Amino acid sequence: MSQTNEAPEAAIVLDRVNKWYGAMHVLRDVSITIGKGERVVVCGPSGSGKSTTIRCINRLEEHQQGRIVVDGTELTNDTRALDTIRREVGMVFQSFNLFPHLTILENCTLAPIQVRKMPKAEAEELAMSYLRRVKIPEQAKKYPLQLSGGQQQRVAIARALCMKPKIMLFDEPTSALDPEMIKEVLDTMVGLAETGMTMVCVTHEMGFARQVANRVVFMDRGEVVESGTPHEMFENPQTERLQTFLSQILRGH
Amino acid sequence: MSGQTATIIGTASAAREQPPASLVGPWAWARRNLFGSWWSSAVTILLGYLIVRWAWGFIDWAVINAVWSVPVASNPLDTAAPCRQMAGVGACWAVIGDKWRFILFGRYPYDQQWRPALCILLFIALYGVSANRAFWRKELLYIWVATLAVIAFLMWGGVLGMDYVAQDQWGGLPITLILATFGLAFAFPLAVVVALGRRSTQLPAVKFLCVGYVELIRGVPLISLLFMASVMFPLFMPEGLNPDKLLRAQIAIILFAAAYLAEVVRGGLQSLPKGQYEAADALGLSYWQKTLKIILPQALRMVIPPLVNNFISFFKDTSLVLIIGIFDLLTAGKVAMADPTWTGFSTEIYLVLAAIYFVFCYAMSHYSRSLERKFSRARNR
């Protein structure tokens, strides 16, 4: 497995990606290759650049140096490339970001109808099937703010899935949730992982990482410090930074 | 302080069982809010006394001692004689009876005044239809275009056997409604475009243009814009091409209103959390899909109160066209006051003018409140 014939199997390639906020160097030569069907958990202390990294994958943040290739398409200033990539990459946010003026069903059907030009009836059918999968079909006619945080996040997952993406990005999906709601969201994500979806997840949920991740990437101060299987990373951390991080995480839980 | 405590106890017990009779009903409300302490009791009594006294004085003048009509006198200048006897004691509503058609329609040919009257009704019907959410569809745009075309046809005439009435003969309430309706109907979409342009990050030239426009227009009073439109603008126009005065004033009002409304809309755009933009981007929506389906519906709902505040203010600001000699409702009223037969009865005319403005403005603010309630219900319950 050499790095040069990455193209066929790789879903996402980050190649020496650099990014600055003004003079602050937030991403330093970040290189990660994620294969199709792979499930990668990115962890690290706050400010380590982990969220910025995955937000670069669908260009919610722009990278300034290096290459990002998603599903064979390189992310450039070409808007068509960006449109293609965003259509294939779903994203779930920490703060859900559902559209509060639309019903749950409308939240899920908007993008398929507008972007994929799907007929309304078909989009609704598809949305209901995903709402059933995240176990809240009965809330379809309600508005987001009438739902609990856990329910809203599950809707957000369903909304992203309705675009039938090849890749799903999760940006701290459980960090804004009350403890009793974290499990319902994680269960949904585990279910999704079992379908073979390519997933990149920024999270501190080490239990989740152990259960579903093929690989854990540890970032600190804008660079990838260590990566490996969950077992290697948690049982046998190589660097001091990861050891410190793990001890802090474990103390916190 | 004791009043607040009572409220808290009231709501707490209401949640569990029926509150005691002493905590509900109008009497309890009055005791809590008007007579909560000796100080608030004193204020209540004093203000109550002043309100009753003033109201009684007004009713005495406006109703009991009022002169409602006067007999026709041989000398026109004596027509108002019965009113003059009651000057200061009772209102002279006879002046309205004599002048109402002039106030409402200005110098529009007397026997043709059914036409502007019909226009007023059409305007009101148009507002009524637009206010109803059941009509918020694409067809509403056609209804607007058709209604405004019919209004133009009625006002101008000149076809189908109707006499042609030149624009400088128009006057009164239709002018006010034309200026306000066309003004806001064009200013609002323009304002949305300018607000979006001002927030554009991709097109710096557009942003610069929008900022310049807003700052330039906000920097000058409406009166000076109206003067420019009526006096300066024709100087720059080629010979023979001279749009009429009403149209020039209309354009000045549109440009002025749009600059202010743009800032209100921009406030709404800014108050939306960044996450809404990001979620729309992440789903692959295009700029216009995102703007029309996600951003504007939320941003505009948030700014309903300041928007309507501006609408009301611009509705009243149309009366400033008085200074460039356009015959709107206020101008017509002022001219009616100058009639030598009725000198000295301007109070009555001003009251009627105020009442007409109030009806339209209050309708707007009432409607905006119902709209806010509807939207917040849809969002939260």
Image (spheres, helix red, strand yellow):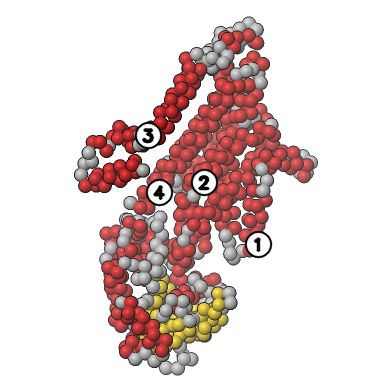
Q: Nearer the viewer, mark 3 or mark 2?
A: 3
Q: Residue furthest top?
A: B74
Residue count near mark 3 (Cα–Cα under 10 Å), binned few <14, some 14–19, many ≥20:
few
Eye-nearest disc, 3 or 1: 3
Residues under numbered marks 4 and 2 in contact, where contact means CB atoms less than 8 Å apart: no
Q: Position of residue A156 (x, y in %)?
A: 36, 66
Residue carrying label 4 = B375
Q: How crowded is mark 4: few (under 14 residues within 10 Å), some or many (20 or more)?
A: some
Q: Do labels 2 and 1 share a chain?
A: yes
Amino acid under label 4? Phe
Q: Mark 3 lies on which chain?
A: B
Counting from the top left corner in percent of width and height, residue A21 is at 55, 74
Which residue is more in the foreground, B127 or B81? B81
Name the mark nearer the viewer: 3 or 4: 3
Q: In this view, does A135 lie to the left or right of A163?
A: left
Say which of marks 2 and 1 sits in front. 2
What residue is shown with label 3?
B38
- The residue singled out by tag 2 in the image is B307
The first of marks 2 and 1 along the sequence is 1
Q: What element carries label 2?
A: helix
- Name the amino acid type tagged 3: Trp
Residue A66 is left or right of residue B230, and the answer is left
Give neighbour class at mark 1: few <14, some 14-19, many 20+ (Cα, 10 Å).
few
Question: For the residue marked with disc 1, what is the amino acid?
Answer: Ala
Q: In which quarter of the image is the N terminus of chain A?
A: bottom left
Q: How far apart are marks 3 and 4 (CA)?
A: 41 Å
Question: Is the residue B67 above or below the residue B175 in the image?
Answer: above
Query: Numbered disc 4: what chain?
Result: B
As helix, strand or loop, the secondary structure at mark 1 comes to: helix
Residue type at mark 2: give it: Leu
Gap in angstroms between the C-alphas marked 4 and 2: 15 Å
Q: Which of marks 3 and 4 is nearer the N terminus?
A: 3
